[in-house]
Structures are given as structure tokens and as C-alpha cells.
């Protein structure tokens, strides 16, 4: 690895000016769990490394009535997993965190790093998109808020400019009677990247069994996490039964665009999208019965 | 293509390992595992995959398990680093060390330091961990020799011992 | 066993304390003054001519001390059997990962940077990957055009097949009349099975430190199996005498499983040290372990069995192709020995086996726990269940009916001795009795159970020497050359010495691992031979030392030598134990010390040095038929040292929607001859089961046109803590069919343990969901596809 020049800015402002100065010759390091591996393989060769781990003001998890949940980019996945308040208000997010890597990885890996690396298999993105989360991006010139749904543009690619830093993830408070489930399929189990990831968030009408809103987001089997909008469309406003769930799952499988890879052939992965979408929807609907 | 002529400055880094403070000069691209092993001689930190998959390099930072092969060394600044060398105290071995010996949880020994430290982090957090929770907690620590049977047995046994100690 | 006080007990491992405190030192932990770090540039092509190499830019980096290429290495080739490999490729590269150049530098980082500046031009050549295609008579690519001109090693004697130019060895077995056997059969079952490449994944990667000494000799510190084999190979390669090569085993070795027998890092390290005059450490990265560190040899097996209606086997015909990759390595020896996997379990009147060692342009293979037996048994034990199903017989009964017994003749003519497999089978079958053969579970899950039989020989010839020094303080110091690769050999060996001297293991000190100082052990800790061979050598050495002690003591206490015995550091007269003298009292010092101080000197020989030599010799066998002459067999002539046996049964859950397989329960019984340390036998069994489950369900070094595409633990999946059944669902039984030559009846057991696992899993999957997977590994996707084909989808 290396050589590169190393910076440890103490504030966001200094970070942003370094980013402006070095632009795409620099790389930001948060926890580094993914970055170190890619740099060691020389898949990434930055000339400047900007380590922001010391900027503690970026490590927070807070709740506001209007904006809902706010997660600082340096918040670790382990913090998300274990926050009692998050477990209470966003159980689907804590649950995703438990499926992420292993404890020793979750202790270091950050939400910002996971999103900015933009691996198609990243675990946090599908559920956050399904929850209509937004990312706050800042540069010397100011800030902008981007829906996470529009954040990813391809494997390893995002709308983040070279002089920008993702500083916060904002997740609106889910409407009443909403629950979400993340289904992750791997080839063995254990600390593994997803072969297929499906997040489903479902909102049920307050007095009836119909589905007033649904979001299905596919991970890994698409170049960038993507909503299965056709599948969502046939569920919306419907009374949910096995038949319609099966139908939606078939459509989601059609919407996925898996490629052949060492972790599974495209055909197989498409089939797994069907099974996982079905299971995610079923469980999510079941949980709406008890969701507040 | 890296530039051949440019020389890069080493960084001065202060690390607190097993209760002692060390000052080292490191290249910024050195991992924590590399610095602990090569610069400070804590060779109980084992590097096996060097890609964060196997957990042999697990050390504790302020009591939290991390994989030191995929962490830039400066990230450990200001934290209490515990390696396997610092686990036993003057009063003797840690209950996990004793249990790993007594329950034959050790074979080639390469995964052992990381495995014990991971187990310590798990039990320090939850002394009531079930077998399933222990197994789930160990998924990032691979072992090629044992099949985990005796490792899990040892951790379950150490847990009981630690319960007794902590209730005193 | 009655009367033993140290062997047969689960003595705490002597290495455990060092290993739980981080004090244990491995090769990777060693640093020598002035040491440089080596790194290797490898071929990106599976087959190519090297047209030019420009090293100038790399040489100019500060911190680079040497760059070597094929021009710098010996013209002669090396290898364990076929001399087909250059230290660095000179003109041709034959696999993705073939070493092309190497750098020694002040740090690993600098060495790696220098590799990036080496400019190599290649002219690509057509390559061949498919084993069956490479085996053909007119293959499109010949991997070694000069094979007929290559020098061949003496062991095993090789049989080239002139019209199959990619074959470097053909091994044949002929027993009875196989065609007549098939004529007598009521049913003939034929199937094709394959196994894939798996990697050993020892947690310590291959590594060594090489020092070219100023007198032309070499000193090597190595984390490897078999220091004497390394010495032999290095002598051959560098034209040195054994006395000029010293190989020192690092104290502990982070796992072997067969992978550390081959020379991977040593020759290149030596070349770099010769050029720099400094010690050079060369360690493989995990990626290199997968691309160039050796894998298990993949097999293509056609098996054709003839059986009677009642299940009696009457004929077996096997044709096996072994894909060695680009260099033969231990491929020919595996080809020779793999047939033993088909020899040891069943009574078969008529048998024919042909095994071919085939070159391809894939990475070279090496020895792997099981050494061919696992692959052969994958076919046989899957096939036994197929036969049982077709005959409508119970799979356990079918096996019972055909089992070899003590005193039977196996298909090489060897008379069977020390076979505990029936008891193993009974134990496993009984333990699984309560489990349903197949059962619907909730949702998509189906349950099934299955079992399989395993065996593994221990190779002969083997020569092991031990020296036992009795010290003035009463310590028994044992010198031998077994490799501590994690199996805990020195604990068991210390138990043997302690037993012989009637002391506890605390009084025994083990010294091992230096060709200059510790005695010969021909092929080191490979082929589960250590306990049997070194154990016997130690027993003999102890007896030799005791004889010397008794001679001295007898004179002092005025007794007859044959009446003397020793226990707890005192020599006594059996008929009158009050007549005794302590070992310490035999020693004095040249300057008389005060009473009670330890002396170093004993009259008349100065030291008590016992020596023990144990040689296991194989019986000669006919190269055309692998048959042992009848008269030799009758005199006890054997193929190998011994056979270890194991039977394993598993219960699995299979998800019919995803193909996922979970192993819920494992029952393993193993005939270890005599368990010298029962807990350590369990360690081997549990570890073998885990590796077996990994090989059954996930493990595969995936290749795309010869290039490894999953060279890391993220994508190469070994078993994790959640893939093993819970503690209460892992049952281990130790069975003792004592071997007449084994120390206290013991046999080795490390390799036997993964031989039955994969077919047991496949048989259980069949019982759960009715599909027979014939190719390893049984991935989720594979199960899914076969289920879908079966459903006609």
C-alpha cells in the first residue's frame, strides 16, 4: 500500500478545504475497514489520505420530531445496532446492522463509509432507501440534501463530488403501522457479503388490512440499490394475501438485474430475489399487525 | 504509478498497549497489526488473511474488538489497546486462557489470541450469552483446526467461572 | 489400557500455555539482524513465453537490494517426483501465478512497490484447463513438451503414457478378473463423480527465512512440514551435500494439512540471499496461498460396480483422472497412493483401478489431508448409497455385508490387520437410530440423515530416529524431528517417553526441529505417521537409555540388570523396591560438587544417550497390478504403515427453495488403535469433520481460465462457528483396534477424519430431498438446480 500523504484534520472545515485542494487524488477514511483492503489490493491508490476518524462531532445519533432520525457519518454500525432508542423507533435499522459483517467490523465500520463506498452489496443502503432516508452532503460552498435513492449511481459510484463530504444521514419518522424487514442471502452464513439483499418497508391502513404504502429495495442484484417500483405498484392499496405477495415477488425478480459472479449465477440470484422478496414482504406485513 | 523519488514522512504516534505507552514512528499506510507486531514486538497479534476476514489479528480498543489488520494505526490513538500479551495479570491467567487450555480449545494456535480476545469482548458485554449468541459473536473469527467445538465449550466454561468472580 | 499411567490420559497440551499467552513463536514472528523481505512477481497468464524482462526501474528504488529473474536461477529443474519446475520461470510460464521474478528489499512495502515496476513482456500461448481434455490422446495443448526428456525422481517410480502426452504417471491395480465379476453381477451401477480444488488454508501462510552462508552452505528457518525433505530437495536443486544444508523448523507452525511439505518459499529465498548475502524472509500473502500455495488435487472418477441381489460386491472398476495443474509436485505420489482409499474397507473379489496424473495449465496441486483417499471415498461412499437404493437394501446393511475383517485379504493381497471399522459403523448407526431417514419440516425445510465410511493409510517407507538424553537432574530430554503443525505431536510423544520412564510429562523435555541437531525423520509429520513412527522410535530410545541406566545402577546396588525398573526418577530392584538409587545419584561432576547439587557427568559413558530407530517398510508390489506377492503378505508384508478408520453420520436440513444445507448433527467414530491422548484424538476428529463439511458444502478454489477468482477468506468459504452443529449435537466415539506394531497399539489419526464427511453429507441430502449430487462442493445453487431439474422446471 502507499505511498501517500496522510492528514488528520480536526474539523469538518479543514477536511473540506483539504478535499477542495486535493479533489480526486484524495480519499477520505472513516473507519477504513473497507478502504484498507481495497488500498492493499491497489484497487485504490490515493495520493492523499484524509482520516476523519478524530472528528468526534460527526459521531452522533439523534432524534428530532421534524427530521426524524439523524445519524452522523462517523456513527459505527455497532452503535446503530445497539442503540436502545433506535431499537424502539427504527427496529428495522438495528436489525440490518446485526446482519452487517461481524462485531469487530461493526465496531469500526461507519454508516458514512458504508454508503460512500457504494458497494452493490452494502447492507445499510436498501433499508435506508426504503425508509426514504436522505444524505446531507457538504462542501466549502455549502450543503445539499440528496435522497439516498438518488445517491448511488453504480458500483462504487455516487453523486458525491470529490470536494464533498457526506456528514449526516436523515431518516424521516415512519408513519404509524409501518414495519420493515431486511432479507440477506449469502452462500454460507457468517461474516459475508450479501449475494442478494432485499429490504421491504410496509405501511398498513389504520383500520383495514390494505397496504397503504410499500417500498421494496433490492441490493447486490443491481448495479446500485434500486426500488422495485413495479412490484410496489401492484401492492399499493391492496388487501394483502399470499397470492399478491407471490405476484409482487415475481415482478421484483424481473426488475432485478443480477450478473453472473463467483457468488452465484444471474439466474440463481434472480430466483433468490423472488424468495427473499416474498419472505421480506410476508414478515413485514405480519409485523405491521403489532407495529404501533 | 507511484513516484519513485518522493520520500514520505513517517508519523510520530503514541500508542497505549497493555497499560504502557509507546512512541513509534510509523508510515501512514501501516496497519495497527503491523505496528503492534513489527514495531512493538507484540507478535501475539497474528496476521493470517490480512483482509479483515479471519479475525486472527483481533485486539481490543477500549474493550471493543477490532480487526487490527484493516485499521490504520493512527485510529488507535488515545485508546487502550489490549493484545493477548496483556491479558494475564500478576494474579494469573484470565479465565478464558485457563479454559482454552483445560478444554483443549487450542491446536495450531494461530487463531487463538484473536479468538480469546473476541470471546473476552463478548463475555464482558454479556455474561449470560447463550451458546448460539457466542457462536454468532464468533463469526468473524475463523479457525481451521478445531471445528469450534472445544472453543465454544471453553468459552461457555470460562463464562461460568467469570460469573462466579463477578458476583463476589 | 490397564497399567498405563501417562498414555491413555488426556494430558494437557504442552504448547497450550504459550499459545494462549501469545508467547508461541512461529516463523512469521522471527526477525534476524539485517534481514530483508522478499516478494515474488507472478505470471498473469496461464501459458506464455517470456520474451523480455526489464528490471532497471525496480532496481533503482531506494531500499531494493536485489532483483532476480529466470536468468539468475539454476538451469536445472526441481520437483518432488518429476523435475519439471524452475525456481523462477526461465522461458515459459505455465499457470497464472508461476513465479517470474523476485525482489529483496528493506521492507515488504518497498519490495511490493518494486514488483510494480518490473516490466515483463509475454507472448501468450494456448492453454488447457479441462482435466479430461488434457488427458486425451491428442490434446490441443501439451503442458510440458519436454516431459519425456525430464529427469524423474525415484519415488514413486513413474510410468509415462507415451500416447497421452499430458500424463506423467499411470497407476494400475488388478485383482481377480473384473470382467468375470461383472458377468456374475445381478446389477451394474456406473457413475461419474468429481471433486474440486480446495485450499488447506493453514492460518500461518507459507514462509521461510533463508541465509546463504559465506562457506556456501545454507541455513533455512521454515514454517513447514518435514525439515529433512526440504533439505533433500534443496541439496538436489543447489548441488549441495546434506551437511551443507541446515533446515530449522520454527518452533510452532500455524497449521499444515499437507500444504507445507512442498518447497514454496525456500528456493527463491535462497537465491535472493545468495545475491545479497543477507537473510531473506519470504512470506506468502493469503492471495498467493490460493494462487500458488498448492491446493487439493481435483479428481474425475468413473466408478462401475457389480453387485449381487443380496448386496454382495463382486466387481469394482475405477478410472480416475487427477488434475495436477502445471507442475507435478506430489501429484504422481497422490496418484500412486489414492488407490489405497479403495482398498481398505470392502471385500471385493474382482477389482481394476487406473489412476492417471494429468498436467493442465491450472495452478499446481499439493498433498492435502487425505492424500487422494478423500476424493476416492467421495465416489465410493456415494456409490454405496446409490447401490443400496437400487437394490432396495438398507445402506448400513449393504456396507456391513461387504466389510473387510481382521485376517481377510484386501484387493492388493495384503492381509488385513487392525481394522475397527465395523465397531465404528455400529456406533454411528446406533447413535443415529433415533433420527428419521427423511422428514418434512416446517416450510421449505426437509430433514435427512446419511453416513459414510472412511479410511486413510499411513505411508511407508518411513524412517524415524529418536534420541533420549537422561539429564543429571532427572529430566528426560527427547530429541526428534516431528513438526508441531497444531496436532500437538510433542505432547503425545512426551507422554510416551514419560510412560517409559514412569514419570509425569513435566519431567520430559522435548527438543525438535533442526536438521543439524535433531535426528532423522524421513518425511516429517505428514501422512499421519508421527505417533506411530516417532512414537516407536522414542520407545526404543527410552529402552536403550534405560538399559544403560540399569547397567550403571545394577553395579551400584549390586543387582541384576534384568531385575531393574525405573519410576519417578528412581531405579529400583523389582523384587526388593527398597534397593534403589535415584537417577540424580548416578551423576557426578568432574569437580565434585556439594551433595545435592546436580552433576553432569556419569561414569563410564559421560552421558546417558539412548537411541531408537523405527523403520516402516512397505511390501514390494507388482507395478502392473499393485499386488503384494502372496508369500510376502503371509509374512505380514503391508502396503503402508497402518490404516486408520472412521465412520461419520450426519443429519442435515435442506431448504428446497434456496438449496441451503445445514448440518444439524454429526456423529463420528474413529478407530485410532489406542487413544494415547483421548481429548487430542477428539481435536483431530472435530477438526476433520469441520474441514469435511467445508469441503462438502462450500470450499472451492474457483478458477476462470486458470486464474483464481476467490483468493481470500471473503470469497473462499471455510466453516465458521455458526456452521457447525451445537456442542450437544457433535458426538465423538473413539474405537480401539490395536495395531500390533503401534506404540501401545496406537495408530495415527489426523488424516482419516475428513475422508467420510463429504459423502455422508451427500447421502443425507439425498435422503432429505431425493437428489444425488455427484460433484463437490454441494453449493446452495447446485442443490437448487438439481432440485429444479428433478421437478422438471
Image (cartoon, coloured by chain):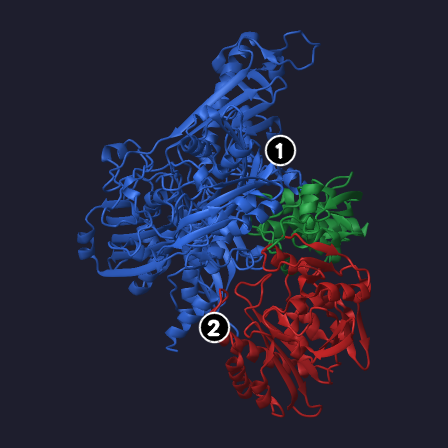
A155 or C609, nearer to the observer: A155
Q: Is residue C525 left or right of residue A16?
A: left
> On what subunit does the disc labeled 1 rest?
C
- Residue A266, labelled with which disc? 2
Q: Which residue is mark 1?
A: C32
Q: Nearer the viewer, mark 1 or mark 2?
A: 1
Q: Chain A shown in which color?
A: red
Q: Are marks 1 and 2 in contact (CB under 8 Å)?
A: no
C197 or C690, nearer to the observer: C197
Where is residue C215 drawn, in percent x and y?
A: 51, 23
Q: Residue at x 77, y 41 (%)?
A: B89
Q: Quadrant of the C terminus of chain C?
A: bottom left
Q: Residue at x 31, y 54 (%)?
A: C141
Question: What letter labels the chain drawn in blue?
Answer: C
> Image quadrant of residue C91?
top left
Q: Chain B shown in which color?
A: green
Where is residue C613 drawn, in percent x and y?
A: 43, 25
- Tag 2: Cα neighbours inside 10 Å, few (<14), some, or many (≥20)? some
Residue B158 seen from this side: yes
Q: Is residue C567 left or right of residue C410?
A: right
Q: Residue at x 42, y 27 (%)?
A: C614
> Does dot 1 land on a helix, a strand or a loop?
loop
Q: Is residue C569 left or right of residue C422?
A: right
Report the Cα–Cα distance between label 1 and label 2: 51 Å
> On what subunit does the disc labeled 2 rest?
A
Where is residue B19 drawn, in percent x and y?
A: 80, 44
> Does dot 2 land on a helix, a strand or a loop?
helix
Amino acid at each position: 500500500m502507499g505511498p501517500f500523504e496522510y492528514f488528520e484534520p480536526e474539523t469538518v472545515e479543514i477536511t473540506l478545504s483539504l478535499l477542495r485542494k486535493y479533489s480526486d487524488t484524495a480519499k477520505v477514511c472513516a473507519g477504513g475497514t473497507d478502504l484498507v483492503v481495497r488500498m492493499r489490493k491497489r484497487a485504490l491508490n490515493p495520493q492523499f489520505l484524509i482520516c476523519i476518524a478524530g472528528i468526534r462531532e460527526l459521531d452522533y445519533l439523534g432524534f428530532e420530531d421534524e427530521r426524524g432520525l439523524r445519524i452522523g457519518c462517523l456513527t459505527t454500525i455497532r452503535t446503530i445496532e445497539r442503540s436502545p432508542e433506535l431499537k424502539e423507533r427504527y427496529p428495522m435499522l438495528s436489525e440490518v446492522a446485526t446482519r452487517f459483517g461481524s462485531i469487530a467490523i461493526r465496531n469500526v465500520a461507519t454508516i458514512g463509509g458504508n454508503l460512500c463506498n457504494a458497494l452493490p452489496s452494502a447492507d445499510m443502503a436498501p433499508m435506508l432507501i426504503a425508509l426514504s432516508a436522505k444524505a446531507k452532503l457538504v462542501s466549502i460552498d455549502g450543503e445539499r440534501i440528496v435522497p439516498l435513492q438518488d445517491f448511488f449511481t453504480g458500483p462504487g459510484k455516487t453523486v458525491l463530488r470529490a470536494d464533498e463530504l457526506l456528514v449526516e444521514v436523515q431518516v424521516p419518522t415512519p408513519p404509524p403501522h409501518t414495519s420493515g424487514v431486511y432479507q440477506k442471502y449469502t452462500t454460507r452464513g457468517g461474516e459475508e457479503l450479501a449475494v442478494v439483499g432485499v429490504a421491504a418497508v410496509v405501511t398498513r391502513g389504520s383500520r383495514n388490512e390494505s397496504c397503504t404504502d410499500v417500498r421494496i429495495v433490492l441490493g447486490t442484484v443491481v448495479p446500485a440499490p434500486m426500488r422495485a417500483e413495479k412490484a410496489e405498484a401492484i401492492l399499493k392499496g391492496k388487501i394483502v394475501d399470499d397470492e399478491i405477495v407471490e405476484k409482487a415477488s415475481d415482478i421484483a425478480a424481473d426488475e432485478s438485474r443480477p450478473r453472473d459472479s463467483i457468488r452465484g449465477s444471474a439466474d440463481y440470484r434472480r430466483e433468490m430475489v423472488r424468495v427473499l422478496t416474498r419472505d421480506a414482504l410476508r414478515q413485514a406485513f405480519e409485523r405491521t399487525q403489532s407495529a404501533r | 504509478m507511484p513516484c519513485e523519488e518522493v520520500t514520505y514522512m513517517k508519523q510520530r504516534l503514541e500508542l497505549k498497549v497493555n497499560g504502557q505507552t509507546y512512541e513509534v514512528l510509523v508510515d501512514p499506510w501501516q496497519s495497527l497489526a503491523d505496528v503492534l507486531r513489527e514495531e512493538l514486538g507484540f507478535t501475539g497479534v497474528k496476521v493470517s488473511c490480512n483482509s479483515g476476514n479471519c479475525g486472527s489479528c483481533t485486539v481490543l480498543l477500549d474493550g471493543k474488538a477490532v480487526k487490527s489488520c484493516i485499521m490504520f494505526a493512527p485510529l488507535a490513538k488515545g485508546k487502550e489497546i489490549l493484545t493477548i500479551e496483556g491479558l494475564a495479570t500478576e494474579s494469573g491467567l484470565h479465565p478464558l486462557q485457563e479454559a482454552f487450555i483445560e478444554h483443549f480449545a487450542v491446536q495450531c494456535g494461530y487463531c487463538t489470541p484473536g479468538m480469546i480476545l473476541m470471546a473476552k469482548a463478548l463475555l464482558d458485554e454479556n455474561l449470560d450469552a447463550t451458546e448460539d449468541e457466542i457462536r454468532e459473536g464468533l463469526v468473524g473469527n475463523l479457525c481451521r483446526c478445531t471445528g469450534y467445538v472445544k472453543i465454544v465449550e471453553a468459552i461457555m466454561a470460562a463464562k461460568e467461572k467469570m460469573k462466579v468472580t463477578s458476583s463476589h | 489400557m490397564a497399567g498405563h499411567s501417562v498414555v491413555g490420559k488426556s494430558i494437557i497440551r504442552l504448547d497450550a500455555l504459550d499459545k494462549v499467552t501469545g508467547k508461541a513463536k512461529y516463523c512469521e514472528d522471527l526477525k534476524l539482524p539485517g534481514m530483508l523481505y522478499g516478494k515474488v512477481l507472478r505470471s498473469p497468464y496461464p501459458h506464455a513465453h517470456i520474451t523480455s524482462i526489464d528490471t532497471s526501474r525496480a532496481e533503482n528504488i531506494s531500499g531494493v537490494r536485489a532483483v532476480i529473474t529466470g536468468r539468475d536461477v539454476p538451469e536445472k529443474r526441481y520437483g518432488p517426483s518429476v523435475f519439471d519446475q524452475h525456481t523462477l520461470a526461465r522461458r515459459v510460464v505455465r499457470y497464472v501465478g508461476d513465479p517470474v521474478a523476485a525482489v529483496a528489499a528493506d521492507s515488504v512495502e518497498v519490495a511490493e512497490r518494486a514488483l510494480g515496476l518490473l516490466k515483463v513482456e509475454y507472448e501468450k500461448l494456448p492453454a488447457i484447463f479441462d482435466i479430461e481434455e488434457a488427458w486425451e490422446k491428442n490434446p490441443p495443448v501439451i503442458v510440458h513438451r519436454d516431459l519425456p526428456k525430464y529427469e524423474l525422481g525415484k519415488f514413486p517410480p513413474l510410468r509415462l503414457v507415451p500416447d497421452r502426452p499430458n500424463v506423467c504417471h499411470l497407476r494400475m491395480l488388478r485383482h481377480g478378473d473384473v470382467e468375470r465379476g461383472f458377468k456374475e453381477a445381478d446389477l451394474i451401477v456406473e457413475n461419474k463423480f468429481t471433486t474440486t480444488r480446495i485450499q488447506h488454508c493453514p492460518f500461518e501462510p507459507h514462509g521461510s527465512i533463508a541465509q546463504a552462508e559465506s562457506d556456501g552452505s545454507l541455513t533455512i528457518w521454515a514454517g513447514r512440514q518435514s525439515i529433512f525433505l526440504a533439505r533433500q530437495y534443496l541439496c538436489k536443486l543447489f548441488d549441495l551435500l546434506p551437511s551443507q544444508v541446515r533446515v530449522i523448523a520454527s518452533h510452532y507452525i500455524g497449521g499444515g494439512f499437507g500444504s507445507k511439505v512442498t518447497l514454496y518459499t525456500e528456493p527463491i529465498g535462497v537465491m535472493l540471499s545468495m545475491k545479497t548475502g543477507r537473510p531473506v524472509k519470504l512470506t506468502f500473502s493469503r492471495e498467493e496461498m490460493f494462487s500458488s500455495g498448492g491446493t487439493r488435487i481435483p479428481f474425475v472418477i468413473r466408478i462401475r460396480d457389480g453387485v449381487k441381489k443380496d448386496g454382495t460386491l463382486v466387481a469394482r472398476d475405477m478410472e480416475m483422472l487427477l488434475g495436477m495443474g502445471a507442475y507435478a509436485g506430489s501429484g504422481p505420489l497422490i496418484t500412486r497412493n489414492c488407490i489405497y482409499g479403495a482398498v481398505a474397507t470392502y471385500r471385493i473379489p474382482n477389482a481394476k483401478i487406473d489412476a492417471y496424473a494429468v498436467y493442465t495449465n491450472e495452478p499446481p496441486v499439493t498433498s492435502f489431508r487425505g492424500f487422494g483417499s478423500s476424493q476416492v471415498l467421495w465416489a465410493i461412499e456415494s456409490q454405496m448409497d446409490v447401490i443400496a437404493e437400487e437394490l432396495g437394501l438398507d445402506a448400513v446393511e449393504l456396507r456391513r455385508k461387504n466389510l473387510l475383517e481382521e485376517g481377510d485379504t484386501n484387493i492388493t493381497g495384503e492381509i488385513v490387520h487392525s481394522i475397527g471399522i465395523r465397531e465404528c459403523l455400529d456406533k454411528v448407526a446406533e447413535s443415529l437410530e433415533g433420527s428419521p431417514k427423511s422428514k418434512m419440516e416446517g416450510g421449505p425445510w426437509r430433514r435427512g440423515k446419511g453416513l459414510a465410511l472412511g479410511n486413510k493409510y499411513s505411508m511407508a517407507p518411513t524412517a524415524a530416529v529418536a534420541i533420549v538424553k537422561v539429564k543429571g537432574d532427572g529430566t528426560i530430554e527427547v530429541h526428534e524431528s516431528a513438526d508441531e503443525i497444531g496436532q500437538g505431536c510433542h505432547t503425545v510423544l512426551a507422554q510416551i517417553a514419560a510412560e517409559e520412564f514412569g514419570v509425569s510429562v513435566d519431567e520430559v523435555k522435548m527438543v525438535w526441529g533442526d536438521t543439524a541437531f535433531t535426528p532423522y525423520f524421513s518425511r516429517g509429520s505428514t501422512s499421519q505417521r508421527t505417533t506411530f513412527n516417532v512414537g516407536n522410535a522414542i520407545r526404543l530410545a527410552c529402552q536403550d537409555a534405560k538399559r544403560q541406566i540399569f547397567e550403571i545402577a545394577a553395579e551400584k546396588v549390586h543387582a541384576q540388570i534384568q531385575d531393574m525398573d525405573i519410576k519417578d526418577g528412581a531405579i529400583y530392584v523389582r523384587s526388593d523396591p527398597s534397593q534403589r538409587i535415584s537417577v540424580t545419584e548416578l551423576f557426578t561432576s568432574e569437580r565434585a560438587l556439594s551433595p545435592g547439587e546436580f552433576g553432569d557427568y556419569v561414569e563410564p559413558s559421560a552421558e546417558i544417550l539412548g537411541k531408537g530407530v523405527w523403520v516402516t517398510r512397505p511390501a514390494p508390489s507388482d507395478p502392473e497390478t499393485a499386488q503384494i506377492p502372496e508369500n510376502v503378505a503371509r509374512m505380514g508384508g503391508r502396503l503402508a504403515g497402518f490404516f486408520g478408520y472412521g465412520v461419520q453420520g450426519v443429519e442435515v436440513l435442506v431448504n428446497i427453495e434456496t438449496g441451503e444445507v445445514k448440518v444439524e448433527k454429526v456423529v463420528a467414530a474413529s478407530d485410532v488403535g489406542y487413544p494415547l491422548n483421548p481429548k487430542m484424538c477428539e481435536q483431530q476428529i472435530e477438526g476433520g469433520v469441520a474441514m469435511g463439511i467445508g469441503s462438502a458444502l462450500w470450499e472451492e478454489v474457483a478458477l476462470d481460465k486458470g486464474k483464481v477468482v476467490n483468493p481470500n477468506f471473503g470469497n473462499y468459504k471455510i466453516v465458521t462457528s455458526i456452521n457447525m452443529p451445537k456442542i450437544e449435537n457433535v458426538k465423538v466415539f473413539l474405537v480401539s483396534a490395536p495395531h500390533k506394531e503401534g506404540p501401545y497399539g496406537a495408530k495415527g489419526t489426523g488424516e482419516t477424519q475428513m475422508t467420510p464427511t463429504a459423502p455422508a453429507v451427500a447421502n443425507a441430502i439425498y435422503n432429505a430431498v431425493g437428489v444425488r449430487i455427484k460433484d463437490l462442493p454441494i453449493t446452495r445453487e447446485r442443490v437448487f438446480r438439481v432440485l429444479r431439474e428433478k421437478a422438471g422446471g
